Image: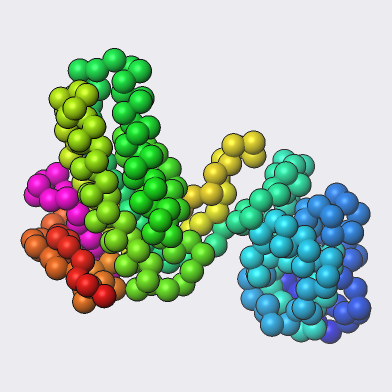
Amino acid sequence: MTKITFENEKVIEEDNLDQSLLEISLKHGISHMHVCGGHARCSTCRVIICDGLENLQPKNKLEQTLADKKGLEDNIRLACQTRVKGPVSLRRLVLDDRDADLAIADELQQTTGREHAVAILFSDIRGFTRFSERHLPYDIIHILNRYFQEMGEVVLANHGYIDKYIGDGLMALFGVDEQQPSSNCRHAITAAMQMQQALERVNDYLKQNFNERFEIGIGIHFGEVVLGKIGHRDKAQFTAIGDAVNLASRIEGETKMIDSSILVSECMYAHIKDQVHIGQTLKTQLKGKSGDYLLYEVLELTST
């Protein structure tokens, strides 16, 4: 007899392992969703494997095709196609009709949440509220779009992912598809330095046409986040959430306090300390955080 644990539902002892997980769960009275009838066309029978992933048979062609289409992580399996060969603990992910609608609608990559270490960059235009009060709405939008075009090109050129725009702020991630901390951190720092250069081009335009000048602050942290698509199914966006995101945002806020352009966390600095020249080092408390945090002002990259 093989023990199959459906977390928060039922522990099953089963001796017929020729059956799929879906067949086993239905046999033992679990109302397991399977909109397509168990033919690997909808993914509503998907489960997350909490323990015993090694005790599952490899994905067959049908399951692999749907997993690739929907961007399912390795620990997300289709119960209708999965067979066990030893003890396993799992949890159903689609529990009602609303869950089923969302599962069927998901057709893009990265639909399931996954933990991942990334470099998180926040930038913000200082004093933008005062700037917006002095100019017409058309000019505000035009200038912001011109600014974000310049900054976005820098992020993309350095293998970054533009996560979102928050008013006049920008959040970017480096390392979404790679687990190379030093390389990802290097890309983030390079982007930050090049954003400063791109800002000069924006400022030349602003001075000539509006007699204005922007200054920006950039905060960067390296840490674990949860990556996935979030939001209404018709407007869901791939993004990062977690404490590391909040920390990067708080670090950016500190640039205003010490009149610095680029500040990085201690975790970030550990990965790029041999590749940068630093200025100020400060130990400070961050808004909404407990304890002291060590931050480093990055002045320039060393040659590679």
Can I make out residue 168 in this image? yes
Point out the image quarter for the C terminus.
bottom left
- Residue 260 higher or lower than 118, as above or below: above
* Residue plotted at (28% across, 61% down): 189
Q: Position of residue 103 (x, y in %)?
A: 72, 49
State the residue in front, 30 or 179: 179
Q: Is residue 101 left or right of residue 118?
A: right
Hey, which residue is sitting farthest top in the picture? 136
Q: Position of residue 204 (x, y in %)?
A: 20, 35
Q: Position of residue 166 (x, y in %)?
A: 37, 37
* Residue plotted at (24% across, 56% down): 193
* Residue plotted at (44% across, 64% down): 175
- Residue 204 higher or lower than 270, as above or below: above
Is residue 41 on the magenta stretch? no
Point out the image quarter for the N terminus.
bottom right
State the residue in front, 230 or 29: 230
State the residue in front, 186 or 171: 186
Q: Which residues are magenta?
A: 249-267
- Magenta span: chief secondary structure: helix
Q: Is residue 77 left or right of residue 151?
A: right
Q: Position of residue 84 (x, y in %)?
A: 80, 78
* Residue plotted at (40% across, 56% down): 157
Can I make out residue 167 in this image? no
Q: Is residue 2 left or right of residue 72?
A: right
Q: Quadrant of residue 283?
A: bottom left
